[in-house]
Image: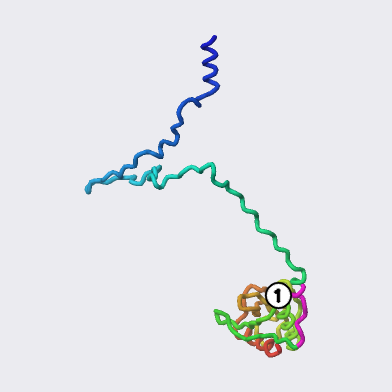
């Protein structure tokens, strides 16, 4: 009976009475790599599970060290409602359209405007009203005026799109085909933009 009790006690305690040698590898001796003769070939010179040198081995965290603290998430920024309203304000009286007739990197004519998008939209709309280009529709959200183009511009089509786009240099105005899939030819595109540019104040 005593033997059975002793055996049961040892089973319950498991191997806790055995010495813990799980970290003995830290004191293992590091030997230099094997030297291969000049006329020999060794495949797999890099070990898959190499033991780092003594000074490169990890050291367990000491109990008195501070515990890792999870950083707090960044605070959300509350946008000022008035900031969004400023974008919808009409252009101030006497303000210039700040427009320049130029060409893009491929030589296509464009108008560059260094002003806010809502103001550029307003300036371009007012300029179009003074030309013989007819506005058939408009979509301010995507920045497109849909135009009916007279024959004198030699566009080859009655319809075109005038597209306003945000760029790093300001608002770019370009003439697209009826589908809005590509720029129109340079000559009619320049004629249309010159007509609009001449009416921009």
Depicted 29 relative to depicted 19: above or below: below
Quadrant showing the N terminus = top right
Q: Tell whether 146 sits left or right of 26.
A: right
The answer to whether residue 160 shows anywhere in this view is no
Could you tell me residue 68's position as x and y percent? 58, 48
Query: Which quadrant of the structure image shows residue 96?
Result: bottom right
Q: Tell whether 3 sits left or right of 155.
A: left
Q: State the residue at coordinates (58%, 83%).
A: 103
* 80 and 166: which is toward the camera: 80
Q: Tell whether 63 sits left or right of 156.
A: left
Q: Residue furthest top?
A: 1
Q: Please provide the residue range marked out in magenta.
A: 85-93
The answer to whether residue 194 shows anywhere in this view is yes
Which color scheme did the rendering employ for the protein?
rainbow
Q: State the residue at coordinates (54%, 43%).
A: 64
Q: Residue furthest bottom?
A: 198
Q: Secondary structure at mark 1?
A: loop
Query: Which quadrant of the structure image shows residue 163?
Result: bottom right
Q: State the residue at coordinates (30%, 44%).
A: 32
Could you tell me residue 5's position as x and y percent? 55, 14
Could you tell me residue 153's position as x and y percent? 66, 87
* 11 and 49: which is toward the camera: 11
Could you tell me residue 42's position as x and y percent? 29, 45
Depicted 163 relative to depicted 200: above or below: above
Query: Which quadrant of the structure image shows residue 110?
Result: bottom right
* 131 and 30: which is toward the camera: 30
What residue does disc 1 label? 143
Quadrant showing the C terminus = bottom right
Q: Main secondary structure of the magenta part?
A: loop
Q: Is 31 included in the stretch rendered in magenta?
A: no
Count the marks: how many? 1
């Amino acid at each position: 009976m005593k033997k059975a009790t002793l055996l049961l006690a040892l089973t319950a305690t498991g191997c806790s009475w055995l010495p813990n040698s799980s970290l003995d590898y830290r004191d293992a001796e590091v030997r230099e790599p094997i030297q291969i003769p000049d006329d020999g070939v060794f495949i797999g010179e890099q070990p898959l599970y190499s033991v780092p040198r003594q000074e490169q081995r990890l050291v367990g965290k000491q109990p008195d060290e501070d515990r890792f603290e999870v950083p707090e998430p960044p605070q959300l920024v509350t946008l000022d409602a008035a900031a969004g309203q400023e974008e919808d304000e009409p252009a101030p009286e006497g303000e210039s359209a700040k427009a320049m007739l130029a060409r893009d990197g491929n030589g296509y004519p464009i108008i560059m405007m260094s002003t806010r998008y809502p103001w550029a939209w307003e300036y371009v709309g007012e300029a179009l009203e003074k030309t013989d280009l007819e506005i058939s529709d408009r979509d301010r959200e995507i920045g497109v005026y849909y135009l009916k183009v007279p024959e004198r511009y030699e566009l080859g089509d009655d319809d075109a799109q005038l597209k306003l786009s945000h760029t790093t240099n300001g608002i770019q105005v370009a003439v697209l085909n009826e589908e809005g899939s590509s720029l129109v030819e340079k000559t009619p595109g320049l004629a249309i933009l010159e007509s609009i540019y001449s009416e921009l104040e």
